[in-house]
Amino acid sequence: MDISKRTCLAKSLDFQIANLRNDGIVFDICNEESAKAYLSANTYLFRIKRYASNFNKHDDGKYKNLDFAVLKDLAVIDYELRMALEYLVANAEHDLKVRFNNLLMSNSELDGRRIAKLVDPNDRFVFDEKTGYRNQHDGRPGKTGIKLKYSPYSDAMVRKYFPDPEIWNLWECFNLGDLIDSYMKYLESLHLRDNATKFFGNFRRLRNAVSHSAPLLLDVDRTNKQGHVPQTEFVDGCLCDLFQMDNPPAPIPSTIKKSQLVYDYSSFLCMFLIVCNSMPIRRIAAKLMLDLEQRICKNYEQYYQGNSECIHLRNTLACIIRISRAFSEYIKAESDQPHQSGRLHFIPQPFSVK
């Protein structure tokens, strides 16, 4: 880097530090030079300031003795949380296909093309050589294949199978939303219910956030403007199985009703246990959750436990610690196969038709 660029960067970092100081952020634990090094190598100003939304302000709009070291710690925890979830959501998506496939294989009258037509009645995934892909400049718009985009990794498969696809072919081009919608349609056609579907909304939200590297440790409240608190009875019951207690430990019961992250996180981990039957995958997931718990605990007592300026964040982190530990211990207690009973072991079941 030449001198002029170094000078420009130094001025930019000075400006960022001044901006943070103007918001009331202090540099007692992490000094300015360390903060500059972190800002230049690991993150950017707008991103790290988003974590400050978890803390109270004075009447003048400045934060109350919020040290840059705490924002840095939250950024690292948030990264570790997303990396752990990235592994789990990727496997959960694959496991949902395995679950779907097992359901299909149990049908003695299975017709892969008929099921493809059931879940894609408008032929959005049917390939037509005349119209080509919708994202090709020379492709003419048509009524079929409007969901197919050209990729060199899938082109040969699409041209071979997608003029008349079977359900297994479609999975290879489905996004998560398409996969969930098709699974729900198939369950409905057989008059089946699956407890895993109760958590699909949580699954999609976390998967989308993780895939876009969106920060998760933000002060996001589940209650609406009228103060309505969404119901959590089903996930509460699953957490009782997870903790093997009559009620999950505090502060989970109250925080799960208010915190979007705690609600999505706990719900998704329950869904993961329902759909994932591979013990090697479960054990890796348990290790990731244990590592995450330990990383949060590293500075929890110093930065958050007694901090009255971030009560919501403190409770959120406490919930993640307890839920991650329970998840790891639940899997650790298994031997050669997942638990075979309870709400966290569920296969699709018939429901009565009125």
Image (cartoon, grey):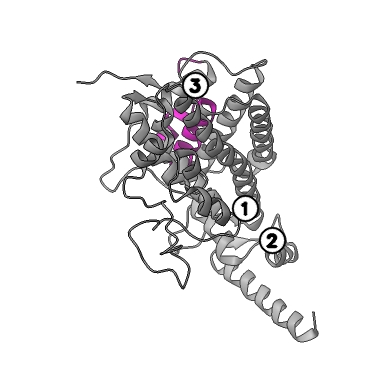
**Residue drawn 45% across the image and 19% down it:** 343
Tell me, yes or no, if residue 251 can be seen here. no
Give the x, y percent position of residue 189: 31, 30
Query: Marks 3/1: CA distance?
Result: 32 Å
Which residue position holds label 2? 42
**Residue drawn 71% across the image and 57% down it:** 30
Type of amino acid under label 3: Leu
Give the x, y percent position of residue 259: 43, 41
Image height of 159 relative to 337, above or below = below
Give the x, y percent position of residue 93: 53, 39
**Quadrant the C terminus occupies:** top left
Instruction: Reply yes or no: does residue 145 show up in magenta.
Output: no
Q: Are marks 1 and 2 in contact (CB under 8 Å)?
A: yes
Which residue position holds label 3? 344
Query: Marks 2/3: CA distance?
Result: 38 Å
**Residue drawn 46% across the image and 72% down it:** 138
